[in-house]
Image (cartoon, grey):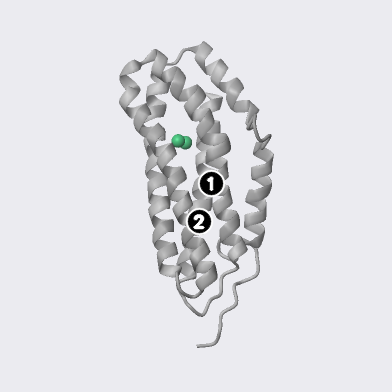
Amino acid sequence: MDKAILTLKDEHRSISAILLGLKHLATMAQDARVKPEFQVFRSMLRYIDEYPEKLHHPKEDEHLFARLLQRAPATKALVDGLQAEHVKGAELIRELERKLMFFEEGWPAGGREFLQAVDAYADFHWKHMRKEENELLPLAEKHLTADDWRAIDRAFAQNQDPITGIEERDFQKLFSRIANIAPAPVGLGDPWKKAPA
Ligand SMILES: [Fe+2]
Ligand SMILES: [Fe+2]
């Protein structure tokens, strides 16, 4: 399999791991006696906001999608749909951040709304990634040339946002930090305090 495809799938797995952890902790926080460490939620949201936004989607849009459109114009509807989802995903994240702010300020109120927004975002993003892996990547493998893949591999290997200078390793650090501060079973951090019933 091409290197760029492996990179893309790896990135999907990282995003997916954070989404799964976020869903688990948002569910745990439905018990009003459990006071969440809101820093954990904030770090997770930062990851699922910035990683796709600054590193992952630009590579898809500018390299993979653009070349596929050149080679196979009939894929336009699929590519347009995925690009529209990149925009929609960024809007859903803003909504999620708002819900988290209300939850943190009004705790224990706002937990249910936060969980609903987490579920909506996770389902949306999982569908998006599945569409890319199951529909777009097979078409890319079929239509792109060896030269295309070399160019895409080069672009994917850089893994840096040219404007902000944010790099892959910054996100690896953030990923480790989340694993260190999130409570079990998501991470290795201290358990969230539970008030007696
Ligand atoms: Fe995407
Ligand atoms: Fe993707």
Circles 1, 2 touching at the beta carbon (< 8 Å): yes
* Label 1 neighbour load within 10 Å: few <14, some 14-19, many 20+: many
The residue depicted at 40 percent of the width and 65 percent of the height is: 113
In which image quadrant can residue 169 be found? top right
Q: Nearer the viewer, residue 51 or 14?
A: 51
Task: Left or right? Give the position of 160 relative to 185.
Answer: right
Q: Which mark is residue 49?
A: 1
Count of labels in the image: 2
**Residue at the image position 61 percent from the left and 71 percent from the top:** 191
93 sits left or right of 44 in the view: left
**Mark 1 or 2, which is nearer the eye?**
2
Whether residue 25 is visible, yes or no, is no
Q: Residues within 10 Å of mark 2 (few under 14, many from 20)?
A: some
Query: Which residue was labeled with disc 2?
Result: 97
Q: Residue, x 48% and y 78% (percent of image)?
A: 32
Q: CA distance from mark 1 to mark 2?
A: 10 Å
Residue at figure coordinates x 60%, y 68% from the top left = 37
Residue type for callout 2: Glu
Q: Is residue 22 visible?
A: yes
Does label 1 point to a residue whose CB lies under 8 Å from ligand 1? no
Q: Position of residue 60 (x, y in %)?
A: 49, 29
Question: Which is nearer the N-term, disc 1 or disc 2?
Answer: 1
